[in-house]
Amino acid sequence: MSFETDSQLGQLEHDWMQLEDGMSLASTIFGKDAFKSRQDGKYQRSPNRAVIDIMAYYFADPAVRAAIPDDKKPAIRAAFEDLCDNNAKFLQALQTSTKTTKATSQRFHDWGDALRKVIGAVVREFPLARNP
């Protein structure tokens, strides 16, 4: 891969750092359960690509990270657990292919809505139509 300008390389490095910071936040909030789905009230053993997708997308946003003080972290974990435990469509969207538009829309919108309830409007709306 070659970059046309130092600016492009700088943007890539910046974006990579945002992603790393977001993944670190997810690890802080969820500990050993980071990036895992949850079924029947228990976290699964292995990380889940669909969970990685939603956590990386929202937590890579510096405005989202800035809106999450330490005292909100337990509520964020609880919001994810509630979605997995009580929203069959969300759980199905985590367990099906990461490639379908419908499952992608479902999981991103549901997780964004849950985050918005905890930390407010700083959470941007996912750009894919809801339930396409």
Image: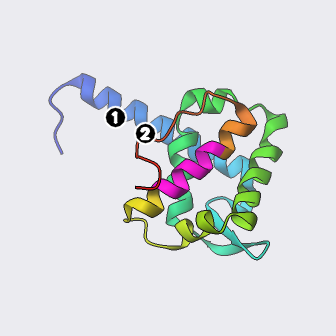
> Which residue type does callout 2 highlight?
Trp
Q: Which label was assigned to residue 16?
A: 2
Q: Which label was assigned to residue 52?
A: none
Report the colour scheme. Answer: rainbow
- Residue at coordinates 28% horizontally, 31% vertically from top-left? 9
Where does residue 66 sit, x and y in percent of width and height? 66, 27
The answer to whether the residue labelled 1 contacts the one labelled 2, judged by CB atoms less than 8 Å apart, is yes
- Residue at coordinates 47% horizontally, 49% vertically from top-left? 130
Q: Quadrant of the N terminus?
A: top left
| Dominant secondary structure (helix, strand or loop) of the stretch shown in magenta | helix
Where does residue 96 sit, x and y in percent of width and height? 49, 73
Q: Which label was assigned to residue 12?
A: 1
- Residue at coordinates 77% horizontally, 31% vertically from top-left? 69
For residue 25, say whether it is visible. no
Does residue 18 appear to the left or right of 110 in the view shown? left
For residue 64, say whether it is visible. yes
Q: The residue tagged with tag 1: helix, strand or loop?
A: helix
Distance between mark 1 and mark 2 Cα atoms: 6 Å
- Picture quarter containing residue 100? bottom left
> In the current view of this chain or complex, which residue is farthest to the top?
7
Find the magenta span and give its range.
Answer: 105-113
- Picture quarter containing residue 67? top right
Q: In which quarter of the image is the C terminus?
A: bottom left
- Residue at coordinates 66% horizontally, 37% vertically from top-left? 116
